[in-house]
Structures are given as structure tokens and as C-alpha cells.
Amino acid sequence: MKKTALLSSALLLVAAATLTTINSQENAMSFFITSKGSGDGANLGGLAGADAHCVALAQAAGSSGKAWHAYLSVQADGNKPAVNARDRIGFGPWYNAKGVMVAENLNQLHSEFMRLGKQNSLTENGTVVNGRGDTANEHDILTGSSLDGRTIDDSSNHTCNNWTSNGEGSAHVGHFDRTGGGDNPTSWNSAHGSRGCSQENLVATGGAGYFYCFAID
């Protein structure tokens, strides 16, 4: 009887550990705000450089086995077509570093029902970024995107020359804490344009050159 009870207990422990591992894998981090930018303003080295930055930060934080893309749109340039940020990040669901689901799918992510905000939009290390009211305010997040996650189709450049410029131009940004000024102050991805593309101008506008990273698988 004792052997049977011990065997049953052991099986229960194995099952519980397996379930915990599965849940941990399912809720593993698949979204974060970069804890640091390129240091060169909005010059991220294009999409390739931004994606590489996401990968490096995720790996340094202990994440493995995922492919990461930056949530950035780029505008058409000659024979190169425009790229929408929403088309680069997979289909969800996405979880922050604490295992909280911030959006189940693309439609929820780009709706009022997403769960982004100061407490859930964390860095890869699970830390809260300085927002409006903090010193310094770093709530501007580079996206180059419209409210629905697409390029902004007008005659202006909203991506600092497709994330290769640290000088003239402007980058469209969102407010990760969903508060502040601009045309859409509560938008996480499309609040207003930056003052310029240099690190100094991004800081002056209320940012630090951070951007969003999403796991695409």
C-alpha cells in the first residue's frame, strides 16, 4: 500500500511539474520594450538592425528559441515596397516578461481591448520604463505607424528615412503609458511625430529611442 501511495505521489509530482513547464513555455515572453535604444537616435540600422537589437536583448535576458522582429513600419522607397509594422510580428498571443498576456491577436492588439500600458508594457528584463511624470520621461516609442499598425501614407517621412537617419526628419511614435500630448495621446503606437531623428531630439520630445519587439512564432 505504501509503495502504491508513493508511486501515485511521484506521478502527481511529475504531472504537476510537466504542466508547470508547459504553462511556462506557453506564457514565455514574446513582447517587450527595448531597455535601451541604438544610442544613435532613430538610426537603428534599418529593419535588419532593429531586429538584431531585439534578438540580442531577448537573448541577454534569457529568452531562447524565438524569432524576434521590431514593431516598425517602413515607407516605400524606389523599388522597395512599404512594410507595415503589424505584418512583421506574427499573429499572437503575446506575453510580457511577467507572463501577462498583452494581446491575443492582431485585431485585439490594435483595438481598445489590448492590455498595453505602463504596468504591462515592460522591458525584456521585466522592468517598468519611465513614463510621463517620471524623471526622465521616456514614453515615446518609435513605430513609424498609424493607429492600425500600417505605414502613414502622406507626403511626409515618418520613419527617419526608414530608420537610418540620426539627423533631419521625424519619427512617428506611440506612448507606451498611453498618456500625454499629440493627436492621439492615449495611443501606444501612433501618438505624434518626434522633433527630429537625433538622440537629442528624441529625448527632447519625450523619448529615448526605444521600440517594441515581438516574437513572431
Image (cartoon, rainbow, N blue to C red):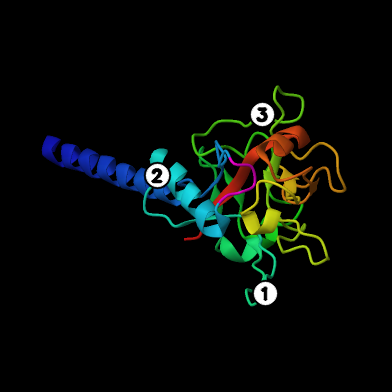
Numbered disc in front, either 2 or 1 = 1
Given the image, on which type of amino acid does mark 3 rest?
Answer: Asn
Q: Position of residue 85 (x, y in %)?
A: 64, 61
Asked if the residue under mark 1 is in contact with the one under mark 3, i.e. CB atoms within 8 Å, the reply is no
Q: Position of residue 83 (x, y in %)?
A: 64, 67
Query: Which residue is tagged 3?
Result: 130
Q: Position of residue 134 (x, y in %)?
A: 72, 23
Numbered disc in front, either 3 or 1 = 1
Is residue 36 on the magenta stretch?
no
Residue located 73% across and 64% down the image: 151
- Identify whether 36 is placed above or below 64: above
Q: Residue furthest bottom?
A: 79
The mark found on residue 59 in the picture is 2
Range drawn in magenta: 40-44
Given the image, on which type of amino acid does mark 1 rest?
Answer: Gly
Circle 1 residues within 10 Å: few <14, some 14–19, many ≥20: few
Residue located 73% across and 38% down the image: 201
The mark found on residue 78 in the picture is 1
Nearest to the observer: residue 190 or residue 31: 190
- Identify whether 68 is placed above or below 115: below
Q: Is residue 117 left or right of residue 93?
A: right
